Image: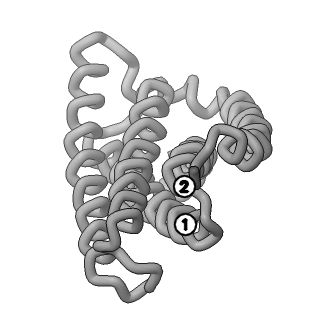
Amino acid sequence: MIYGWKKIVRYGLPLLTLCVFIEMFAGQMLQGGQNTLLKIPIFLISIPAINGVGGNIGSILGARLASGLHVGSITLDIRDKKMHENLLTSLLMGIITYAVLAILIYYMASFSGATMGIGLIEFVFVLLAVGVLLVSVVSVASIFTAFLSFKRGMDPDDFVAPVVTTIGDTMGITFLFLLIGAVGI
C-alpha cells in the first residue's frame, strides 16, 4: 500500500504541528491590529470570508492537481496545459467571488446598521485587491505543494489543504493590513 496510515502520520504530523504554530502567529497579528479593525468594523466582518474563500480556492486547485497527477492527466511540468487551465480557473473564480462578496458584505453590514467608515468603492477595491493577491499566493502554494509532494511519493491530498489554508489565513490578514495602510484608511 503506497499511502498507508503510518506514512500519512509520519509525514503529516510534523506538517500539521508547524501549521498550528504559524496559525497562532496569524492570530497574534490579528490581535495586534485590532485597533485598526475596530475603527472600521466592516473589515473585521470580512476576515472570515477573505480567509475562507482564499483557502477554499487553493484547496480546490490542489485537489484538482492531485487528482490530475494521480490519473496522469497532469504532468510534473510547470508548462503543463491542464495545470495552467486549472490555475486560470482558480484566479477567475477568486476575482468573481471576492467582487461579489465585497458588495454583499458592504450592503449587509450597511443594512444591519454597522458603522461603515468607508465607501463602497474603497471597500470593494481593498477586498478585491486582497482577494487577488491571496488567490495568487495560495494558487502558487497549491501548485508547488501538490507537485513537490507527488514527486516525493507522498499523497498531495494530505499536504495541500493544510499548507494552503495556513498560508491563506496568514497572508489574508497580512494583505488586508497592508492594503488598509496603502489606501490610507
Q: Position of residue 128 (x, y in %)?
A: 34, 52
Q: Nearer the viewer, residue 54 or 174?
A: 54
Q: Nearer the viewer, residue 7 or 141?
A: 7
Q: Is residue 167 left or right of residue 138?
A: right
Q: Residue at x 24, y 73 (%)?
A: 85
Q: Amino acid at mark 1?
A: Phe
Q: Position of residue 66 (x, y in %)?
A: 42, 59
Label 2, on which residue? 155
Residue 23 in sight here = yes
Q: Nearer the viewer, residue 101 or 37?
A: 101
Label 1, on which residue? 150
Query: Which of the colour schemes (rainbow, by chain, secondary structure, one colour) is used?
Result: one colour
Residue 29 in sight here = no
Q: Position of residue 45 (x, y in %)?
A: 43, 25
Q: Residue at x 34, y 83 (%)?
A: 80
Q: Residue at x 78, y 38 (%)?
A: 17
Q: For label 2, count other residues whose C-alpha is less than 10 Å away and answer few (under 14), some (14-19) or many (20+).
A: many
Q: Amino acid at mark 2?
A: Asp
- Label pair 1/2, CB-CB below 8 angstroms: yes
Q: Position of residue 179 (x, y in %)?
A: 51, 54
Q: For label 1, count other residues whose C-alpha is less than 10 Å away and answer few (under 14), some (14-19) or many (20+).
A: some
Residue 68, numbered label: none
Sequence-first disc among 1 and 2: 1
Quarter location, residue 67: bottom left
Residue that lies at the very extreme toward the front in this rendered image = 1
Give the SS element for disc 1. Answer: helix
Q: Is residue 63 left or right of residue 183?
A: left
Q: Is residue 85 left or right of residue 28?
A: left
Q: CA distance from mark 1 to mark 2?
A: 6 Å
Q: Is residue 67 above or below residue 115?
A: below
Q: Residue at x 43, y 56 (%)?
A: 62
Quarter location, residue 84: bottom left
